[in-house]
Image (tube, coloured by chain):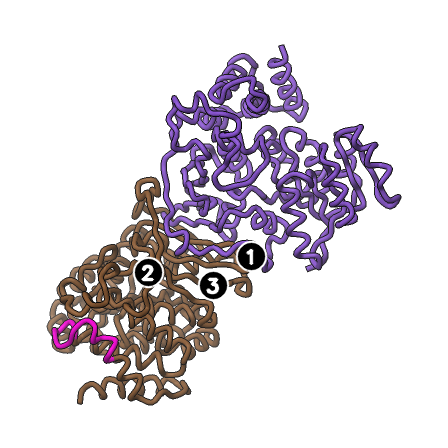
Chain colours: A brown, B purple
Amino acid sequence: MDKKKVFILGSTGSIGVSTLDVIRLHQDSFEVVGITANRNIELLQKQIEEFNPKFVAVRDEKLALQLKDNLSKDITLLIGNEGIISGTRDADYDILLSALVGFAGLQPTIEGIKRGKRIALANKETLVVAGEIITQLAEEFNSELIPVDSEHSAIFQCLVGEKHKEIEKLILTASGGPFFRKSREELENVTVAEALNHPNWNMGNKVTIDSATMMNKGLEMIEAHWFFNLSPSKIDVTIHPQSIIHSMVEFVDGSIKAQLSKPDMRLPIQYALTYPERLSNSFTNTKLTEIAELTFFKPDLTKFECLQLAFDVMKIGETAPCILNAANEIAVQKFLNNEISFTAIPELIKEALDKIEIKSVVDLETIVECDSLTREYFKV
Amino acid sequence: MDKKKVFILGSTGSIGVSTLDVIRLHQDSFEVVGITANRNIELLQKQIEEFNPKFVAVRDEKLALQLKDNLSKDITLLIGNEGIISGTRDADYDILLSALVGFAGLQPTIEGIKRGKRIALANKETLVVAGEIITQLAEEFNSELIPVDSEHSAIFQCLVGEKHKEIEKLILTASGGPFFRKSREELENVTVAEALNHPNWNMGNKVTIDSATMMNKGLEMIEAHWFFNLSPSKIDVTIHPQSIIHSMVEFVDGSIKAQLSKPDMRLPIQYALTYPERLSNSFTNTKLTEIAELTFFKPDLTKFECLQLAFDVMKIGETAPCILNAANEIAVQKFLNNEISFTAIPELIKEALDKIEIKSVVDLETIVECDSLTREYFKV
């Protein structure tokens, strides 16, 4: 394999750090040409020293200027959202690892797509809010979208060598999060600390709360709908608390294929970088005889209202997923700030879906406008 | 898909009957050109009426002659082992479904291979005793070997689109059979009826006893070793009492793929006929949320001595698997006849492996001779 050049959007987040871990192990196969951070310039500085990228982008302007003094002249420093976007437009890379959190990941990812690069996609919002546009662009510019989420990677792996028309159903597995065994009533009073305590995965705060509300699975469902070009009726969710089976595909003949391993994000990240090859590593050693038991439950959609809302907007389509996504980001932030209760999260989203007009997606502008409108709505 | 012509070796056995079930459902895709039976001419007669094959073979000479009077003139009746072999040599077919039980399946299967046909292989012994010869012949004559056993089909399906060099390990699942929870001491006194009472699968008597001793899994291991051209160290067995995951493949990157469904042999049979396509059916509707729990255990090799013996002969190679296979057939028959106890089965096999010389496999004659020698040994 030739040495592939990787540009990492969001190198200081949990996916970014794991990606650098993978690259560290396979230095003969990969090199880092660009990294970006939001505010964590301390970690960014260490990453620069270790991986010596050509491009570094920092979203926070003040912190960017602070970093500037310590930077070697060979490195191009880019600043703000515009800087991040220009990095993905100008740098020389083969793979864009898109791991920014939230709506901010959309535009730089599009830059990579338009250049026909492989996109290792960890940013859910890209497909959730702009799935139609993104998949069309990817086809037009011959850009490969490879999933990084463990669930979509599992499905992607199960589909290798199989035919799209022979897919009966995708079954996304969900851990059920920290509140799987709590009653609807108990959910009223859960604290931020409880919600941040995920049983299986170590992720960022936003994603961890989304996992507690199961909105995470809802967003993944919508993402899968676009990723794999399947109608909403062919996408389902099963709770599997051990997070060993990362997702499954059922085929028309009744055969089901599953991909499994102990939870470790480095596995799907590596696959997104190396596909269609697989490289040896020592990340996990999954012994089912030690795990002993895998269990499965139907999700309770009256308890996990966010999942029901995601099912609904997936069917509605148009800008409904964009409204859901923006309202959810705001609601989660309010919950993290102790401004609202845990169960108020779906209430805010419902309100947004009621009050904001759902429109058909004409272009990216429709999406940007809908996102802004939703955020504006909550500023009042 | 063109209508494929299928010749079924062993149409009145459980695999044969399931194969006809599959073909009944997909009459636009398949037609039956040949069927064979050992002694069950009553069922054979019904199959002839329904499927109107061109060739019919009966192993028992007297019963064959009895059938002759009722047979239309368009149908060629073939008699005895020689008849079965000549059928697979002369009939016009695309797929040979090889489902004879025991050593008798070897020679007619080779006829199909030498004609470059697709072999849907349900006869374990073909690969267990003559794996080296068979896989070489298949390559030489460009004959496709497709597995029918649910375990090998699962592995075959998991390997679609994957690379051989990236396989880390095959993990064959075993139900553990009816005696999984019995102690070694309790095994001493189990009856034939208890041994025939398999928890998940409805199979022939020989296979069901093999499942109770776990020799079935041992034979499948050796079969997998040849089927997938992997060293014995890359093949392992895990007990999974629910028989939902039919087997798994672990890759070098730590990712594991599994194939699953409710137990129904029609699924892997259909796949062997339709591969690389999948056809719709209503055989199974696997809902993991209803199954709720999948469990996994290490096999106890001191209790299931037959499995240990299979591990041993797989490593030894040469004619050792042939001796094991013949001795096992005889021992199982003796147990079914109430001549020996259940725990005497591995004892007889060990005796045979001790007493009969293990030779390298030069040609098919070596195998036939070794098989005869082993059977002779027990006639004394």
* Mark 1–mark 3 distance (CA, rounded to whole Å): 11 Å
Which of disc 3 and disc 1 is earlier in sequence?
3
Q: Viewer-proximal residue, A312 or A6? A: A312
Q: Which residue is mark 1?
A: A253
Residue under the image location 32 percent in, 60 percent down:
A174
Residue under the image location 49 percent in, 42 percent down:
B200
Q: Viewer-proximal residue, B47 or B246? A: B47
- Which residues make up the magenta segment? A335-348
Q: Looking at the image, can residue A159 be seen?
A: yes
Question: Residue A303 falls in which quadrant of the image?
Answer: bottom left
* Mark 2–mark 3 distance (CA, rounded to whole Å): 16 Å
Residue under the image location 66 percent in, 56 percent down:
B25
As drawn, is A331 to the left or to the right of B321? left
- Give residue B211's position: percent from left, percent from top: 50, 33
Q: Which residue is mark 3?
A: A169
Which of disc 2 and disc 1 is earlier in sequence?
2
Residue B111 on the magenta span:
no
